[in-house]
Amino acid sequence: MALSEQYLEDDIHPIDIVEHLAEHHDWDFDRVADDQIAMAVEGQWRTYSITLAWSAYDETLRLICTFEMEPPAERMGDLFEGLNAVNDQCWAGAFTFWAEQKLMVYRYGLVLTGGQVATPEQIDTMISAAVMSAERYYPAFQLMVYSDQTPHQALQVAIAEAYGRA
C-alpha cells in the first residue's frame, strides 16, 4: 500500500503527515507547534537537524536541514564560492550558511497554493533529498574550509552521487 492511500479521504495537515513519517522511520522528533516539527535524522557523516513548518499564509511547506559548521574567517570567501558552485548543482533546494548561528543550511519550500495537498511520498522525498544533499556535499564543505584545497578541488569529492559504501 502506498503511503498516501491511507490519507485519500482525509484532509490532513502536512505536519501530521511528517509526524507519521518520523514515527515510521523511528526518527527522534518534537512537535514544536501545530504547524512545525523538528527531527533528528542520522546520516553517514553526522546527525542532521530537520525542521518542517507549514505556512498557511502562502501555502508553503518549508524544510530546513542544518548541521553545525565553524569555518575560519579567512576561509569564508572559499566557502561562499563553493556554495555558489554547489547550488548550481542542486535543482531542488539550496544551501546557505548562517554565520551567526554557525549552521550550514539546506532549504526547500513545497508550494501548495490553491488548496493543493502534500502527499506522504512528496514529503518523504523532500526529507530524503535534504539528507542526500547534505551527505553528498558535507565532505566538500569540510575540505573547502579546513584544507588548502580550492572550492573547485573540494567539489570533486561530490562530483557524482555515491551509492553504497566501498
Image (cartoon, grey):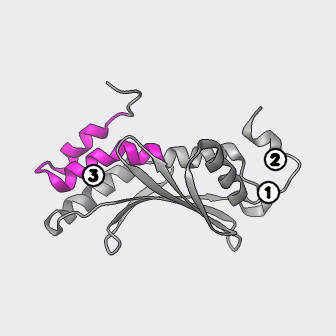
- Give the prevailing secondary structure in the magenta stretch: helix
The residue at 45%/46% (across/down) is 42
Query: Mark 3 is on which residue type?
Result: Phe
Q: Is residue 24 left or right of residue 151?
A: right
Q: Residues within 10 Å of mark 3 (few under 14, many from 20)?
A: many
Residue 126 appears in the figure = yes
Residue positioned 60% across, 43% down in the render: 25
Q: Can you identify the residue that label 3 sits on?
A: 141
Judge depth for marks 2 and 3 and give the one in front: 2
Magenta part of the chain: 131-160
Q: Residue 33 is drawn in which quadrant?
A: bottom right
Asked if the stretch drawn in magenta spans residue 108, the answer is no
Label 1 element class: loop
The extreme left residue here reads: 148
User: Dot 3 lies on which element?
Assistant: helix
Task: Give the spatial CA distance, label 1 vs label 2.
Answer: 7 Å
Write the residue at 70% across / 46% down. Answer: 120
Please state if 30 lies on the left or on the right of 56 as rendered. left
Q: Is residue 129 left or right of residue 119?
A: left
Q: Nearer the viewer, residue 70 or 30?
A: 30
Q: Is residue 109 above or below residue 126?
A: below
Sequence-wise, the earlier of marks 2 and 3 is 2
Return the x and y of residue 10 as percentages of the image width and height: 86, 53
* Residue 7: mark: 2
Task: Choose the circle earlier in sequence order: 1 or 3.
Answer: 1
- Residue 53 visible in rendering: no
Q: Name the amino acid type tagged 1.
A: Ile
130 and 6: which is toward the camera: 6
